Amino acid sequence: MSATYINDQWVQQDQLGLGRAGDELARMSLEVNPPFTIGITGKWGCGKTSVMRRAFATLGGKPISQGLRLGQDKIELNETTLSELNSLRHRFENGRRNFALDWTTDLHNVADQSLSIWYSPWQHQESANPLIPLLQEIRAQYQVKRRILENGRQLNRQGGLAALTLIEHVIDAAISFTSGKPVKAAVGVSENVRKAWNENNPENLAKPSDGQRFHLLFEDAIENLLDDLNGSSRKKLSYEARLIVFIDDLDRCEEKAVVALLEAIKLYLGTSRCVFILGVDDVAVGDALKRHWQGRSDDNNREYLEKLFQATLPVPQPQPKQVRALILQQLESHGFPADAREALANDIEALLEPNPRKVKNFLNSLCINWQMLRCKAMKEAENCRRLVMFQYLRVNHRPVWRLLEREPVLLQLLLRVFTDSTDPLNIDSKSLSTDELRLTREIFSRSFAHVLKHDDGKDMKLHRSQSLDAAVDKALERLDRRRSDQYFVEWMKQNVSPNESLPAMYLQITDTD
């Protein structure tokens, strides 16, 4: 097996046991009654994007659409690309969707008549009106899917032009919100939209208070898009057909962009054909709302999100057996000794919280260090284990590691801090002064204070001044760190001798012989 490193991008395969969450999300998006908004929640790196991408693919979303630049008018698709995408769609629909999902025929039909869109708002958060790039993405991805379906369905050219004209007018109307310039009534809109448009002066459309007419225009445009994709030779468009919009990484945006997009969804885009799925770190979004609406209580911000989301799906933790399999796979591919891998996997599982991104990042860093530093001595199982432990120290206690890099003999002092020992160090007294050793001991003690002594009550006082959510986040963070650090401390006590320095082979590239 060749050595590989794990990309931190989303994965569609069920690599860590999160696939079922994505499949259930896809089913839910077809079973709810629009308008409906679903929140996919979880902390940084937990797998929100992978869950959403799995659902997106299950619903027939086209991977190529993410590669399009937002607002790109010209869609460049050569015959090879179209052939590959059609092949992918054929394999997927006749394989997984029709076998493993256990969907009813009606549910398959709804999925087949629906359009799924992927949108990353943080890439376009500088836009003055978040509606504009989102609508442009709907237009671009509609055009892509239409090109893909042209060979298999009798699509009406005039219907496509009419649908495209309508979405163009919706974009123009959104631009008018930002520019203040009015737009003319769209040719080809339904009678209901035209009547609502003409009841008042068209000049008023430039005012945000006129959102109802924009809402009707958007609803009419989506109806036409879905009807066009259904094809003229197929049965009538189901009343359950829908536009499913996946919005990822909203919590990466500035607070102004977060609020603007949430308000746009709530006020203008919640139509009878639309389902929105938002991947968010709910704590980060709550903080963004707090910064935007200063003075508003946390409870009010929480209620705001509860009103926006009709349902929330917290991303489950990855399955332990899948995490372990990933760890063992990486250790094997990079040539770690076979007799050491199980013990190393035990250590890594104990040191890391089950966060997919953190696990991948740690493994990548460990493996590149192994490739650089490995020598004949490093191939011994115990030395491999030390490499894992010192890598944990390097990543999670950077100040401690910097001191050890400069003065490897300070490993003795670190062990004495862990054992609460005052025994003298076996070092040259001229290399480090008494004051330097005292300061270093204080630094080591501070770094591991949460596992070396009982809480003095300061944290309790701090928590009382925080919101309950913030206090829980802090408590969980400390719990994870305490569990990991306690494991490291116990390993040090059992495996590092009192007079041992940090070996050079963990710091320098040495001869491989």
Image: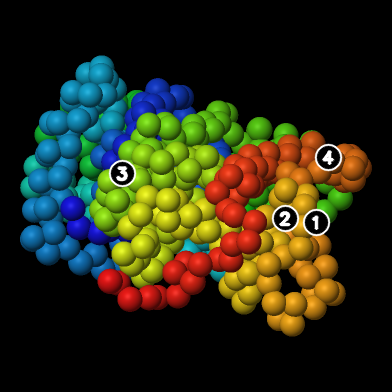
The crowd level at tag 1 (other Cα within 10 Å; few <14, some 14-19, many 20+) is: few
- Does the CB distance between marks 2 and 4 fall below 8 Å? no
The image position of residue 251, as x and y in percent, is: 58, 52
Relative side of 459 to 355, left or right: right
Q: Secondary structure at mark 3?
A: helix
User: Which numbered disc flags the more N-terminal residue, 3 or 1?
Assistant: 3
The image position of residue 433, as x and y in percent, is: 80, 78
Spatial CA distance of label 3 from label 1 is 37 Å
Relative side of 28 to 37, left or right: left
Q: Pointer 3: what residue?
A: 339
Spatial CA distance of label 1 from label 4 is 20 Å
**Camera-side mark, 2 or 4:** 2
Q: Amino acid at mark 2?
A: Arg
200 and 114: which is toward the camera: 114
Q: Secondary structure at mark 4?
A: loop
Relative side of 172 to 477, left or right: left
Q: Pointer 2: what residue?
A: 416
- Does the CB distance between marks 1 and 2 fall below 8 Å? yes
362 and 347: which is toward the camera: 347
Spatial CA distance of label 3 from label 4 is 38 Å
Query: Toward which corner of the image does residue 70 lie, by quadrant?
Result: bottom left
Q: Pointer 1: what residue?
A: 422
User: Which numbered disc flags the more N-terminal residue, 3 or 2?
Assistant: 3
User: Which numbered disc flags the more N-terminal residue, 1 or 4?
Assistant: 1
**Camera-side mark, 3 or 2:** 2
Q: Amino acid at mark 1?
A: Thr
The crowd level at tag 4 (other Cα within 10 Å; few <14, some 14-19, many 20+) is: few
